[in-house]
Amino acid sequence: MQTTHAPQSARGFTLIEMVISIVLLGILSMLSAHMISDSIMSSKSVHAENAGTASGRYAMERLSRELREVRFDSTTGAFLISSMGSPTHMVFVREVLGVDTTVTLDATDQTLTLSHTAGSSSAILAENVTRFSLVYLDVGLAETSSNALIRYVRVSLTVSPPDGPSTVFNNLVALRNS
């Protein structure tokens, strides 16, 4: 009796070939899922870091603009700063369109706020603030507590978003109106 073999192209996969294919596909899908998961976590981390950096940059820029405009009283020879006692709180006067405006900087409960009395407006400059300090300096960059001697303000700010690393900002602001 003569047996006939099926042509090579008509044969199917063997069970071993199917099992090997399934195992290889499983391994590849596990690796790709791990890579996708890592990229999503990296993306979230970068986004949180960028948000903290952007918040800190905005706060420092706004603080610098406000502090440059502290009003200088030429009759007393001093800047109009009424509160310099606390490193996290400052009250000063600046001129806006010919009108004196009292400006308050305050860092409490991890929030840095800026308030103007003219329009009773208050703005949150930064949240998640873990450290904020103001240091008043004279011409020689030595610390001073005299309104007549102050020429610079050193601002230090640390922003620590919940999902990202802390970012530290430091700036030396020259008061321009003397």
Image (tube, rainbow, N blue to C red):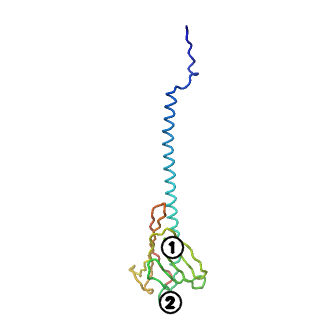
Q: Nearer the viewer, mark 2 or mark 1?
A: 1
Q: CA distance from mark 2 to mark 1?
A: 31 Å
Secondary-structure class at tag 2: loop
For the residue labelled by badge 1, is the local secondary structure a helix, a strand or a loop?
A: strand
Q: Is residue 127 left or right of residue 137?
A: right
Q: Which residue is mark 1?
A: 112
Counting residues from the start of the chain, the first of labels 2 and 1 encountered is 2
| Rendered view: 68 above or below 23 | below
Residue type, numbered disc 2? Ser
Q: What is the x, y in percent for residue 151? A: 45, 81
- Which residue shows up at 58% across the image and 21% down it? 10
140 lies left or right of 51: left
Q: Pinpoint residue 159: horizontal percent, then vertical percent.
A: 47, 67
Residue 3 position by quadrant: top right
For the point 52% across and 52% down, the residue is 40
Residue 148 percent coordinates (x, y): 44, 87
Q: Residue furthest top?
A: 1
Considering depth in this image, is 176 or 31 the residue closer to the camera? Answer: 31
Labelled disc at residue 74: 2
Q: Are marks 2 and 1 in contact (CB under 8 Å)?
A: no
The residue closer to the viewer here, 17 or 156, is: 17
Label 1 packing within 10 angstroms: few (<14), some (14-19), many (20+): many
| Label 2, residues with CA under 10 Å away: few <14, some 14-19, many ≥20 | few
Q: Position of residue 20 (x, y in %)?
A: 49, 31
> In the picture, which quadrant includes the N terminus?
top right
